[in-house]
Amino acid sequence: MRVLYLSPSAELGGAERALLEGIRALRSLEPSWTIGLFCLEDGPLVGEARSLGVDATVLPVPEAFAATGESGRNPAVTLLQLTRGAGPIAGYARSFRKAVLSWAPDIVHSNGIKTHLLGAWSHGTAPLVWHVHDFLSTRGVSATLLRRHRRTAALVIANSRAVAEDVERVLGASVRIETIHNGVDTERFRPDGPAVDLDTLSGLDAATPAAIRIGLVATYARWKGHHVFLRSLAGLFANRAIGRHDVPFVRAYIVGGPVYRTGSASQVTREELEGTLTSLGLNGRVGLTGFVNDTAPIYRSLDIVVHASTSPEPFGLSVAEAMACGRAVIVSDAGGTKEIGEHDRTCLVHRPGDVPALTEALSRLIRDSSLRERLGRSATAAIRSRFTSQRFGESLGAAYKQIAAPLCRV
Ligand code: GLC
């Protein structure tokens, strides 16, 4: 079987890391399959895929299309960008189609909205899979375009039941939709293993080894809730009990960076976060590490991991990875994260954007090390039983075999 993946981005955001994990799992389950990847830009995903034995090609997209992104933008701006770029985009689509057809795939699996549309034009007779990692209903222009092309997709994979319900609302019940939760490499994301010095990484003075370390690990997308996190920390530090001798010293970190090319409409900037740190009086207590590729050692260096997305999270790969590393995680309770964690058993939850509730959950965990340990242990066990890479790869493989032409199913 020849499976060709299409990815709009070559940066390592959640959707790209999920894709790599799926490929890694399939490689060991189906070693005879040939796996290809077409990327619309160059970046770390390409090298990572090649190291897994993938035939990866970069087909650089015209700038007008590359910079188009809907998250956090007025739909009229997106439409205008698309209209202005129509000429070069049509020319690009023709050469993309040629490249796909000459690769001769048995399955075309697209991992993002731009390639869902390009795939619709170029998959030829190979069944097309749209892997949806986002809530399409929040992206009006994309939703309209995808609805128009929905018949080209033999299968839509949703990364959570919440996303599957949204896909059905947007594309209609005639589309075949399957929920396949992402998988976590539990050898890499495990409680024991190397850690990092977060203070050095973020340019802070070394804190006492007994410090409790709290982190938000996310891309700089606006809806990831960086400001909610910082305001909760300000609330926490304003509580005079924190810092008294009976309450451990607390340090916090924002781990991540602006990985996508869609600009500051949809992403916070480092300067903006620095400004918020200053205005909330958090300088010296909260560090910004910047983008980190290998997040497993980061999780192992944290006592508490915060997920603060202000909109429903489609899945929440970082939540699953932090749980696999045995951390005490506080989760924003909407969307796919509800399918990963369970309040008071494997994590604590707070309402999206609810600063006092997040402050309260933080203060509970800071004071109670046995609660942190209990949640961490159950979290690791939950991920190891329900979100393994093996299960992810098997589900992808089974889906491809169901839709591929009979002669290709080997
Ligand atoms: C996207 C989603 C995130 C999910 C990831 C992998 O990045 O925003 O929730 O974990 O895709 O499916």
Image (cartoon, rainbow, N blue to C red):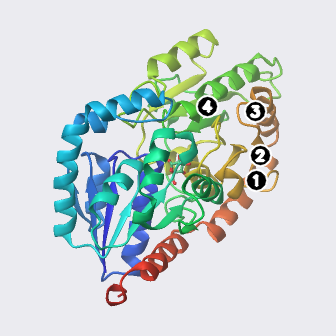
The foreground one among 131 and 12 is 131
Query: Where in the figure is residue 217, as x and y percent of width and height?
Result: 55, 39
Q: Is mark 3 within 8 Å of ligand 1?
A: no
Of callouts 4 and 1, the N-terminal one: 4
Of callouts 2 and 3, the N-terminal one: 2
Q: Residues within 10 Å of mark 3 (few under 14, many from 20)?
A: many
Of callouts 4 and 2, the N-terminal one: 4
Query: Where in the figure is residue 61, as x and y percent of width and height?
Result: 23, 43
- Residue shown at 65% from the left, 53% from the top: 336
Q: Name the amino acid, label 4.
A: Gly
Q: Secondary structure at mark 3?
A: helix
- Measured in 3D between alpha carbons, the distance from the residue under mark 2 to the one under mark 3, in whole angstroms, is 9 Å
Of callouts 1 and 2, the N-terminal one: 2
- Residue shown at 51% from the left, 68% from the top: 389
Q: Which mark is residue 225?
A: 4
Q: Which residue is mark 2?
A: 348
The foreground one among 367 and 351 is 351
Tell me, yes or no, whether the two marked residues, 4 and 1, touch with CB atoms within 8 Å.
no
Tell me, yes or no, whether the two marked residues, 3 and 1, touch with CB atoms within 8 Å.
no
Q: Secondary structure at mark 4?
A: loop
- Measured in 3D between alpha carbons, the distance from the residue under mark 4 to the one under mark 1, in whole angstroms, is 23 Å
Q: Name the amino acid, label 3.
A: Leu
Q: Which mark is residue 240?
A: none
Q: Which residue is mark 1?
A: 375
Q: Residues within 10 Å of mark 1 (few under 14, many from 20)?
A: many
